[in-house]
Image (cartoon, helix red, strand yellow):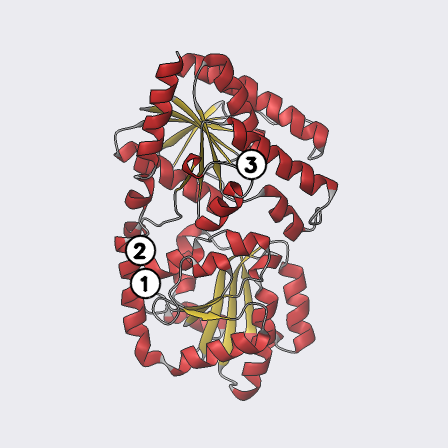
């Protein structure tokens, strides 16, 4: 099986998107499939037309002028299509597999139709919903409706649709797409890549000012939908009765300035540590400083229908966490068994969940074991990637019948 993947961006850039992509490629190759990899102009300027990152070779599409508006997006698709056709004619893949967004699916469709190669479209999130959270559009706007319509147009024409969770699958099927055409490839983790949580580095703990304290924390990108504002508000109430409580926020993103301003407004600046982004190799040292992780995502379309990776990564490391009861979390977490769920959007519910979790430390060992077992036996990449096989085989068989 020869699969030509088309990505928005890839390693060496770090994001949930690139980590999932790399995991897919490694596991597909472990199954004996040949994979080839193209990135869109959104990868940015690169040193060469072909680059290797973490042992994976990526063909690049040079950046194009035009910005992020409609003209720029058309230029991106045109450039991706030209580069993809060049590669497809040379590599002769059995399948062209485009990954979100639709700017990759449309070139894949067009090239596939010209060359008689079946195409798949993998949806990891709906672009328009992410744009709402980032503040670049609003739900129901013209841009929102056009983007949604483009996705639906692509769904009807590709040979196969993949997606990452049941929430997204249900939304796609609700648009009139046959259920059998949509296959879920769940988010998962490579358990061997995660070490079980260790003892906190005493030198780093002193440097952070955490000696003798209990630390709540979050590691990742600071987007509005992550609900870190809710965490700070809940902490402000808790810290008044527990002066030894602290918050560690590791990472950065669009909400960083707002969160720092909120910490100042709440009078908790001296108890909240913002590290900024830290080198990937150092992340585990900061995780080890955190006693209880928090994933307080706000409820919106994006969080209700899309499953995140963070809780799975926490389980793989044997960590204890509280998480809001948005749909994306409920698809992954068994309340009281692999994590603690609380009512989304409620400062009081989050504060109560944190207090209850901290008061039940005797249960943490059992919870850590249950979470680790879940990712080892269910949510691992070997199980997840196996779901591609029947769909790929149907695509190839159908293409042979048409030829």
The quarter of the picture where residue 144 lies is top right
Percent across and percent down for residue 112 are: 48, 19
Q: Within 10 Å of the Cα at label 1, are there few (<14), some (14-19), or many (20+) other Cα atoms?
A: many
Q: What element does badge 3 sit on?
A: loop
The answer to whether the residue labelled 2 contacts the one labelled 1, judged by CB atoms less than 8 Å apart, is yes
The quarter of the picture where residue 2 lies is top left
Q: Is residue 195 visible?
A: no
Of 13 and 6, the residue lying toward us: 6
Q: Residue 101 carries which label?
A: 3
The N terminus sits in image quarter:
top left
Q: Which of marks 1 and 3 is nearer the N terminus?
A: 3
Q: Mark 2 points at which residue?
A: 375
* Up-down relation of residue 224 to residue 162 (above or below): below
Of 45 and 128, the residue lying toward us: 128
* Up-down relation of residue 76 to residue 328 (above or below): above
Q: Residue at x 47, y 44 (%)?
A: 169
Percent across and percent down for residue 132 are: 66, 50
Percent across and percent down for residue 299 are: 58, 61
**How far separated are the C-alphas under marks 3 and 2?**
27 Å
The C terminus sits in image quarter:
top left
């Amino acid at each position: 099986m020869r699969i030509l993947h088309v990505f928005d961006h890839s390693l060496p850039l770090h994001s949930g998107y690139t980590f999932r992509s790399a995991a897919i490629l490694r596991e597909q190759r472990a199954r004996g499939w040949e994979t080839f990899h193209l990135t869109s102009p959104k990868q940015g300027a690169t040193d060469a037309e072909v680059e290797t990152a973490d042992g994976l070779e990526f063909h690049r599409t040079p950046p194009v002028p035009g910005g992020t508006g409609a003209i720029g997006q058309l230029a991106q698709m045109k450039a991706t299509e030209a580069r993809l056709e060049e590669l497809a004619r040379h590599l002769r893949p059995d399948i062209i597999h485009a990954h979100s967004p639709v700017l990759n699916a449309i070139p894949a469709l067009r090239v596939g139709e010209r060359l008689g190669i079946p195409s798949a479209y993998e949806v990891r999130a709906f672009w328009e919903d992410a744009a709402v959270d980032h503040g670049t559009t609003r739900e129901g706007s013209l841009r929102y409706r056009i983007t949604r319509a483009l996705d639906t147009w692509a769904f009807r024409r590709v040979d196969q649709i993949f997606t990452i969770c049941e929430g997204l699958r249900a939304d796609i099927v609700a648009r009139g797409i046959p259920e059998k055409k949509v296959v879920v490839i769940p988010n998962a983790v490579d358990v061997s890549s995660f070490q079980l949580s260790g003892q906190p580095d005493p030198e780093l703990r002193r440097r952070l000012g955490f000696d003798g304290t209990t630390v709540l924390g979050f590691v990742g990108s600071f987007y509005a939908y992550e609900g870190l504002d809710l965490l700070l508000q809940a902490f402000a109430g808790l810290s008044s009765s527990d002066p030894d409580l602290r918050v560690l926020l590791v990472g950065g993103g669009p909400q960083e300035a707002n969160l720092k301003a909120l910490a100042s407004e709440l009078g908790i600046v001296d108890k909240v540590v913002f590290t900024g982004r830290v080198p990937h190799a150092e992340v585990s040292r900061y995780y080890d400083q955190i006693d209880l992780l928090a994933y307080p995502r706000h409820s919106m379309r994006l969080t209700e229908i899309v499953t995140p990776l963070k809780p799975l990564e926490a389980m793989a490391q044997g960590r204890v966490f509280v998480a809001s009861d948005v749909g994306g979390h409920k698809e992954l977490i068994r309340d009281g068994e692999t994590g603690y769920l609380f009512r989304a959007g409620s400062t009081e519910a989050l504060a109560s969940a944190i207090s209850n979790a901290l008061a039940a430390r005797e249960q943490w060992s059992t919870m850590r074991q249950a979470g680790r077992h879940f990712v080892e036996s269910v949510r691992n990449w070997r199980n997840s990637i196996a779901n591609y096989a029947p769909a790929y085989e149907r695509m190839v068989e159908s293409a042979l019948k048409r030829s």
